[in-house]
Image: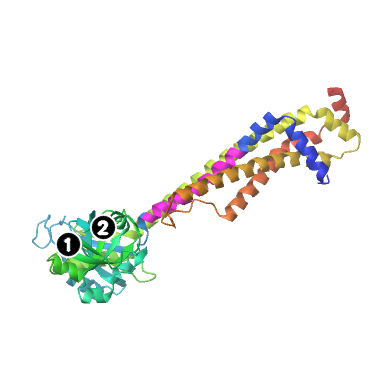
Amino acid sequence: MRIDLDTYREILDTLTRNKSRSFLTGFGIFWGVFMLVALIGGGQGMKEMLNQTFEGFATNSAMVWAQPTTKAYKGFRKGRYWSMEYKDVERLKSSIPELEVVSPVLFSNGGTAYYGDRKASVGVNGVLPDFQEVNSPKMFYGRYLNKMDVTQRRKVCVIGKKTYKELFPGGGDPCGKFIRVDGIYYQVVGVDYNVSGSISFGSEAGTTMLLPITLMQQTYNRGTSVDMIAVTGRPGVVMSTLAPHIRETIGRAHTIDPNDELGIMVFNTEVLFQMLDNLFRGVNFLIWLVGLGTLLAGAIGVSNIMMVTVRERTTEIGIRRAIGATPRMILSQIIAESIVLTLVAGMSGILLAVVILQMLELANTEDGILAAHFQVDFWTAILCAFVIAVMGVLAGLAPAVRAMSIKPVDAMRDE
């Protein structure tokens, strides 16, 4: 059958002959495509938002801290309290060459930061500049801490996003301004917009205030104690294989059983990232299963309605056959009607899903920064369009075969 303007007019006339039935038939395809695209985009956006929980953390990193021992060892009873010291950093560096970064961290019990008549709750952390290799900052203003800050014990700080919003509600660059915490003034040198909250140690997401670790040791009288040691492995090193060596090195120095996994806590972020990947593999499978299942149900509805349409047009098809229409022409006509119906309904579903996903992106944009991409990419849309076309062909195949089998004599008798 030659596809020309008259052909499309005939298809349009057939589909609009019973508008309500065509609309309800196409709605199944429309809803299936809308669900598929919306779920894909929504799942991608939710994955990005969940990834922000771990944003900035190196995938091959681990955090080490002390907890009460759970095993008796060399005459010491279990339940013994102990703490790490600055020498443990050098011990790990010298004993485990597979470690690339070994960075100590100090925590405070929290405090209140003041700027003018504004105040905000903060958690003060003391770090070295190489801590950014473990938890990468997202600097919105200014810079991160550097070696000179540590060497000279400069009274400088990097504040988090939430603290910045509370102390400087009017916006603008706060670098160079002084805030007061525990009676001491610190000059702001940077604003970190990294809000990886669920593994943000020592404080609420966005409220962390970073100081040079040497300044915090002096200001808070912490001496040589260390609250946590953050480490990363060299490229190609699996962190889970280094965890026993880390426990053994620290345990040997503090007379703790190297097998006491709760006494020497090693928090391996590699496990979290693996769990996250496995979770979203399952989510993506469910998205495609639900979306394609809904789309298939719509295609079955289209096929059933086309069967009814063919039955109603028995006489018309018989007359076409009598005046010379070949079975191939009848087949092409019915399949073309099915494809047009599914494509119009499917493209409408894609359009509505894209509009809603765009609105979600706008709602998750703050300070010009997009929190998560909910929009589907071009090739995903093309894949959905291809699936729609295939569904249209399959939906029209059975009715078209039935139409081909109609003989002119039977059609006249039916009339």
Residue 64: give its label.
Answer: none
**Closer to the camera, 379 or 145?**
145
Dominant secondary structure of the residues highlighted in magenta in the image: helix
Give the residues in magenta.
30-52
Circle 2 residues within 10 Å: few <14, some 14–19, many ≥20 = some
| Circle nearer the N terminus (1, 2) | 2
Residue placed furthest toward the right: 323
From the top left corner, tell me how far across and down residue 90 is, in percent. Answer: 21, 74
Here the colouring is rainbow
Instruction: Say which residue label 1 marks.
Output: 257
Instruction: Determine whether the residue tagged by mark 1 lies in a helix, strand or loop.
Output: loop
Quadrant holding the N terminus: top right
Is residue 281 visible in this depiction of the protein? no
Is 39 inside the magenta-drawn segment? Answer: yes
Identify whether 330 is placed above or below 79. above
Amino acid bearing label 2: Phe
Quadrant holding the C terminus: top right
Residue 201: give its label.
Answer: 2
Identify whether 167 is placed above or below 30. below
